[in-house]
Image (tube, helix red, strand yellow):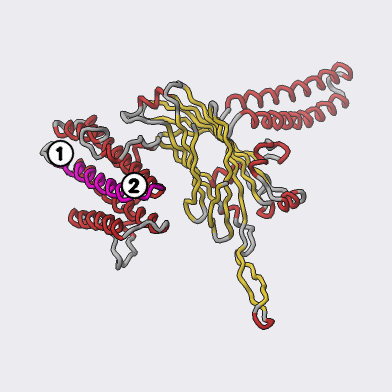
Amino acid sequence: MITDQVKIHDKFSVEIKLGFHARRKTEVNDFGVNTWIFIPYSLDINRSTYSKQDFYRDLKSNIRLITPDYLLRDISVKEKEPFSLLEKALEELANGATRTRIAAYEYHIRMFVSIVKSALRDEIQHIQENNIEEDLDFLVDSLIDNIRRTASNYRNLRRIINVPTVSRELMNYFWFGDEFLSNLYEQHCFKLIDGLDKTGRLTPDIRKKLMETIQSEVEYKRAKGFPVVEKTSPDRNRELVFRLNLLKKYAENELFLATNTRRDGIWIEQIYFSIAAGISMIFATAIAFSFQQKFGNFTMPFFVALVVSYMLKDRIKELARYYFAHRLGRRFFDHRTDIGLSEHQIGWSKESMVFVPEEKIPAEVLKVRNRSAILEADNRNNREQIILYRKLVRLNRQSLDDCSQYPTTGMNDIIRFNVSNFIQKMDNPVVPLYSPGDNGTIEIVKGEKMYYINLVLQFNNENQLEYKRYRIVLNRKGIREIEKF
């Protein structure tokens, strides 16, 4: 199964998160994602002005394991995973800090805090989307209780490794996890308050409970010497923001997969190019032999034939190379990325980009694109430019199971696409509009000029054939919103 999430990452970047979930009973899982990008003609993005190199320069991909799924209430129970695995790793470290035990100790801390983060995110989303109002207080109380129990259980583990065999450096790994968890509790409580407030469901009692939880974590961090937000910070909390980013990278490092990217189909390409060279050589040799037999070795016709055959040989060679390269582009991808973790080869991913004419777009894709009547009429003269970005992924189920002690469903491919190249030829974002005012006056109203880039995604996996459409709304100031249809 393929899941997707498209959102704004920053002012000029779109984040497309693709989740590839491998079936447990299928040894080899293949996934296909085709993305058609419909670009307005006025932006002047075409195969002449926007090359493959430009596209891949604007594209950044991070591949990571899907965080194992646990309920927050299960995480808060000492006897259950993942807490039991973490506790066991700390006990083994206390018995002797060998290289293997140190690696396991750090691995389980990182996995635990990553799992807590994912569970908190899902819990907050569930509470915000809950439509049973009489359960709202219960859900919030359960969240707060589970947060406190999880925090207490983790912090009590300190006594296990507070022994002479564990160095200060190793103890720091524990404190990094503690600080990261405390930041998570605080940030997600703020997010819940904001989310409930926007929907008008935030009661004074719920606000009070959540703010008490936040204040408790802030006081804990101050007591431990962890940095907190300062309202009057002279550097605008610059150091705190930097530290938060470092903690995030440290905590989630275990989920990121090792990748090795190279060009796809290199050997086949060289074989075809060799064939092209052979074809041109056959032509030149045939001309030379025929003129030699007819006119002899040291004659002017034979000399002219050699020169002409040499000239045509290079042209034939280049034309054959172009033909084979075009044929290769249909069958092969631009890049192949091998994906692994430690010594386990999990699978691979292939990708390619090409401009395609509208005549070669499947009818189902154009139907999902769903142009308006006026846009369809305009498209006859000012045709949208269409980029096809293909991605093919293969995952090995056994390798996924072997690479982690935690249940793993698959991998996430987090793609960030920067649209800075698309805004260079946009008009001014503000357009004056005129409206009749009082007493025959004219009022000038500021209108906003926007451009729309449409994405149509096709997901193909076993019995799944699904289409989704998103529209990026942007102007010269950046991305304003992403609409889902």
Residue 134 in view here: yes
Residue 342: where, in percent of width, then height?
Answer: 36, 29
Q: Quadrant of residue 442?
A: bottom right
Residue 16: where, in percent of width, then height?
Answer: 50, 44
Look at the numbered disc 1 and give the secondary structure of its residue: helix
> Tag 1: Cα neighbours inside 10 Å, few (<14), some, or many (≥20)?
some
| Image-based side of 447 in relation to 181, left or right | right
Q: Is residue 136 magenta?
A: yes
Tag 1 near tag 2, CB within 8 Å: no
Residue 212: where, in percent of width, then height?
Answer: 24, 57
Q: Name which residue lies at 82% across and 22% down.
A: 287
Residue type for callout 1: Ile
> Tag 2: Cα neighbours inside 10 Å, few (<14), some, or many (≥20)?
some
Q: Name which residue lies at 32% across and 53% down.
A: 187
Which residue lies most toward the bottom here? 439
Which residue lies most toward the left here? 164
Depth order, front residue of 443/169: 443
Depth order, front residue of 410/74: 74
Q: Mark 2 points at which residue?
A: 248
Q: In which quarter of the image is residue 69?
A: top left
Name the mark on residue 303.
Answer: none
Residue type for callout 2: Lys
Range of magenta residues: 130-159
| Image-based side of 339 in relation to 203, left or right | right
Residue 60 in view here: no
Q: Mark 1 points at which residue?
A: 161
Depth order, front residue of 204/352: 204
332 in relation to 415, above or below: above
Q: How many labels were placed on the picture?
A: 2
How far, Cα to Cα, is label 1 from label 2? 23 Å
Look at the numbered disc 2 and give the secondary structure of its residue: helix
